[in-house]
Amino acid sequence: MVPTRLVGCELLLTRYDRVTAAFGSHGEHVETAEALLPAAERAFRSGRPSCLNVVIEGVPAPVVKRENSSRLATDPIQP
């Protein structure tokens, strides 16, 4: 039996950065990989709790096999 893959959930575009900023935290909306590190540095320098709202492509994670195993990495953990 091939396991079903958990992809996550689809969220509407929500500006969580603005929500956290409204509570006094540092919030930034990040849309590119190049903008991520500078945003993280600004968040750290702010000295406040921070939310980096990073937009990602909504695609399933890749399926990979565990080393020395026929099980897939997406299989449920078994004892």
Image: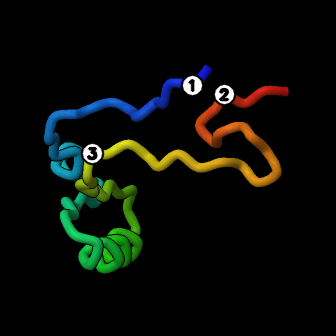
Please state the horizontal and vertical placement of residue 35, each as a whole percent of the image: 24, 75
Q: Which residue is mark 1?
A: 3
Task: Decide which of 69, 43 is in the foreground and name it.
Answer: 69
- Given the image, on which type of amino acid does mark 1 rest? Pro
**Neighbourhood count class around disc 3 (C-alpha, 10 Å): few under 14, some 14–19, many 20 upward:** few
Task: Decide which of 32, 70 is in the foreground and name it.
Answer: 70
Q: Quadrant of residue 29?
A: bottom left
Residue that appears at 35% across and 77% down = 37
Query: The residue tagged with tag 2: helix, strand or loop?
Result: loop
Q: Which residue is mark 3?
A: 58
| Real-space Cα separation, disc 2 to disc 1, in angstroms | 8 Å
- Given the image, on which type of amino acid does mark 2 rest? Pro
Please state the horizontal and vertical placement of residue 75, each as a whole percent of the image: 64, 31
Residue that appears at 34% across and 69% down = 43
- Horizontal side, residue 27 vs residue 47: left or right: left
Q: Quadrant of residue 47?
A: bottom left
Q: Earlier in the sequence, mark 2 or mark 1?
A: 1
Please state the horizontal and vertical placement of residue 28, each as a whole percent of the image: 22, 61
Q: Which residue is mark 2?
A: 76
- Given the image, on which type of amino acid does mark 3 rest? Gly
Residue that appears at 33% across and 30% down = 9
